[in-house]
Image (tube, rainbow, N blue to C red):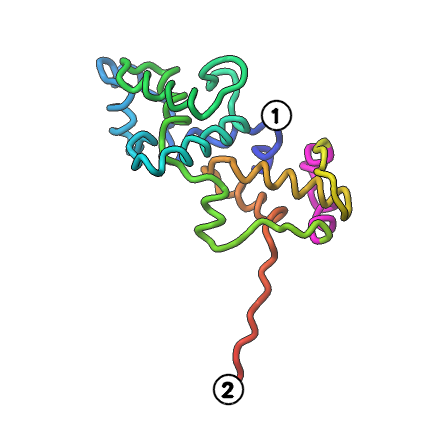
């Protein structure tokens, strides 16, 4: 559940929107990475219009920084959006194997981030540090993780500023587990105020 929001457990946020389960290697012999992904219902980021690709690869990079772990790394060290784009381009026509498919299904396909889901739902991150300060005490197992954040300088309660910065970082997680997303929303989203109905 919310353990996927913890730094150490971030990798438990799933493989991608279509959900691959285990790759059955034998059924993918002699198929390219691109053809296997396509057969599983994935759409490649490279298939987007040219005008949409820069933003899409930047989004992948932000998610990569949060979710990458040993078996999903495309290389050691800092990875940029250009690195990810090039890696995906070079590996699409390669004969598929388990390791490549795991990486490609994570970094080379169109997916929804928490930020995308918030936009879809018409809700925003809470920016008021005083409101966030009140939520800080309700973080439970996330308290330790959020407390390590160095807040941006500014006025307002320090814990509120820490939570604000944490939310702004976690909004780039990939959406695959709704319970994780709902936990994130509970701590990070602006409370909606009911609109008073016009009395007539």
- Along the viewing direction, whichever of 129 and 182 lies nearer the viewer: 129
Q: Residue at x 32, y 16 (%)?
A: 90
Question: Cβ–Cβ below 8 Å for labels 1 and 2?
Answer: no
The front one of 164 and 141 is 164
- Residue 149 placement (x, y as % from top left): 70, 33
Q: As displayed, is residue 183 above or below residue 193?
A: above
Real-space Cα separation, disc 1 to disc 2, in angstroms: 55 Å
Quadrant of res 109? top left
Q: In the depicted view, which residue is nearer to us: 13 or 74? A: 74
Q: Where residue 69 sits in the image (x, y, percent)?
A: 52, 20
Q: Is residue 110 magenta?
A: no
x%, y% of residue 104?
A: 37, 23
| Residue at far front of view | 51
In the image, the segment drawn in magenta is: 131-147
The residue drawn where x is 26% and y is 29% is 38
Task: Say if 200 sits above or below 23 in the image.
Answer: below
Could you say which is closer to the camera, residue 179 or residue 65?
65
Residue ID for mark 2:
200
**Residue 45 lies in quadrant:** top left
């Amino acid at each position: 559940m919310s353990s996927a929001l913890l730094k150490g457990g971030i990798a438990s946020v799933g493989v991608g929107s279509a959900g691959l389960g285990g790759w059955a290697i034998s059924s993918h012999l002699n198929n390219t990475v691109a053809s296997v992904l396509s057969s599983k219902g994935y759409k490649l980021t490279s298939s987007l219009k040219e005008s949409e690709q820069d933003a899409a690869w930047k989004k992948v990079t932000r998610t990569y920084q949060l979710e990458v772990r040993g078996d999903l790394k495309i290389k050691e060290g800092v990875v940029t959006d250009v690195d990810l784009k090039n890696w995906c381009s070079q590996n699409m026509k390669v004969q598929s194997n388990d390791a490549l498919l795991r990486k490609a299904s994570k970094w080379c396909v169109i997916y929804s981030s928490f930020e995308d889901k918030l936009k879809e739902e018409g809700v925003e991150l809470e920016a008021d540090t005083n409101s966030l300060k009140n939520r800080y005490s309700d973080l439970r197992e996330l308290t330790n993780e959020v407390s390590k954040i160095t807040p941006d300088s500014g006025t307002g309660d320090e814990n509120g500023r820490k939570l604000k910065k944490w939310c702004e970082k976690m909004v780039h997680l990939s959406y695959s587990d709704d319970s994780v997303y709902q936990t994130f929303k509970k701590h990070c989203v602006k409370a909606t105020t009911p609109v008073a109905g016009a009395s007539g």
